[in-house]
Image (cartoon, rainbow, N blue to C red):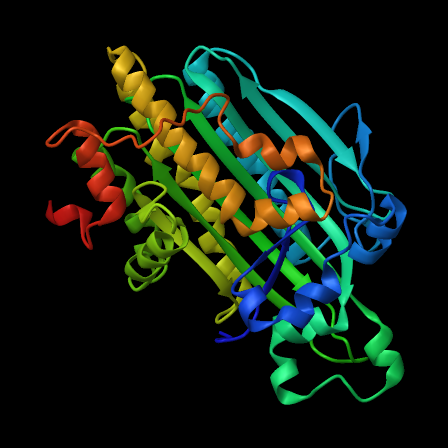
Amino acid sequence: MRSNICRYWFTEMFGFSGIMFREVKRSCPKAVKAFTVSAAAAAESKAEEKGIEKEEMIEAAPSSLLREEADATGMRASFEKMIREAQDSICAAIEEIDGTKFHEDAWTRPGGGGGISRVMQNGNVFEKAGINVSVVYGTMPQEAYRAATGTAEKGEGKSTEQGKAGRIPFFAAGISSVMHPKNPKAPTVHFNYRYFETDSQMEGGPRGWWFGGGTDLTPSYLFTEDAQHFHGTLKDTCDKHDEAFYPRFKTWCDEYFYNQHRGERRGIGGVFFDDMNDRDPEELLAFATDMANSVVPAYCPLVVKHKDDEFTETEKEWQQIRRGRYVEFNLVYDRGTTFGLKTGGRIESILMSLPLTARWEYDQVPEEGSEEEKLLEACRNPPDDWFAL
């Protein structure tokens, strides 16, 4: 695995042509500058600079979003099949709980790729839920490629003026979701699983590829047995592949979903992983598949358990305050969302992750010893081991 370099994650999480990047501004400011376009530029110039074509809405989703001539087999086809099947199965589970159906929007791009957004709004159980899949073809600057692969540190790929001026083709596919229930006792869940490929910047050179993703829980009220069920399901799935995965990815999740200005996590975590290309790709595909398939058993029992719980107006207000924290993280820190907004992605899909309602109160502090304070303490100081509580 590459370390201490800027890593570019091109994904259409929630339908946008975004880049999820780690420490890009600090580590690779030139790469950011090379890829970011001026807000004052014309829309056509933006699209050309980003290397992503404008989406075209279609009436129904095609059987595949891949370029038929090149990608009908191999990892690209396998991963698209996985995320399409996961979208279908998870949507079916949520529809069974809610009793209503998802609305579907689909789009393609002239050069290949596209996406499928499924959204449920003002349902019986869910205030807002969305599950999106996307396939993206595009190009990125040479400097971004070198930053992503670590060749910048080695001085590779800089031998000709033609090489410096060229752009590197990339492929990305992923599934992303956020679900916000109405009842404040039922938690919000987020998950995202993705696969990336980049062509070599030098003829005959190796392609870069990697997997990433994760699943995390954001409750308004903390029920220890629910946290143990959720984390336990994810741990069991991780352990099937490598017992080192869960502790490593649990810590990574706690560190990523952190509202720095509040000094607290967005929720109670789960697992999060990035840059996985350290073993056979088929093995990593199997891991990503199992993780996506663990969403329903990890999350749905918690919604069923709490969807009809009684609650007070004060508890509903607290849920809205916690959702305000959710909005803060997504708009301030989430790399995919913020970059997608800057690069002109499909706005409805970008902002689909946000709750339908949220609340901000001036200097709001939960009462000492209250259930609200209990949740806040878990967000500020997550336990190293949920199972020891």
Query: Can you give x and y, in whole percent of width and height, for residue 118 in the image?
Result: 61, 26
Query: Can you give x and y, in whole percent of width and height, for residue 305 in the image?
Result: 26, 20
Q: Nearer the viewer, residue 66 or 74?
A: 66
Query: Can you give x and y, in whole percent of width and height, for residue 334 in the image?
Result: 51, 48
Q: Residue 319 sits in which quadrant?
A: top left
Residue shown at the point (71%, 57%) measured from the top left: 171
Label total for image: 0
Q: Residue 198 sits in which quadrant?
A: bottom right
For this orientation, the residue located farthest to the front is 362
Q: Nearer the viewer, residue 389 or 280?
A: 389
Residue shown at the point (82%, 78%) measured from the top left: 164
On screen, residue 97 above or below 375: above
On screen, residue 94 above or below 225: above
Instruction: Locate residue 132 relative to residue 159 in the image: left or right.
Output: left
Q: Residue 374 sits in which quadrant?
A: top left
Q: Nearer the viewer, residue 118 or 70?
A: 118
Instruction: Locate residue 137 relative to residue 242 in the image: left or right.
Output: right
Q: Nearer the viewer, residue 230 or 354?
A: 354
Instruction: Locate residue 53 relative to residue 352 in the image: left or right.
Output: right
Q: Is residue 82 visible?
A: no
Instruction: Locate residue 187 relative to residue 292 in the image: left or right.
Output: left
Q: Is residue 267 visible?
A: yes
On screen, residue 182 above or below 288: above
Residue shown at the point (58%, 31%) measured from the top left: 352
Residue shown at the point (57%, 37%) measured from the top left: 85
Query: Can you give x and y, in whole percent of width and height, for residue 275 in the image?
Result: 51, 65
Question: Which quadrant would the C terminus be assigned to in this image?
Answer: top left
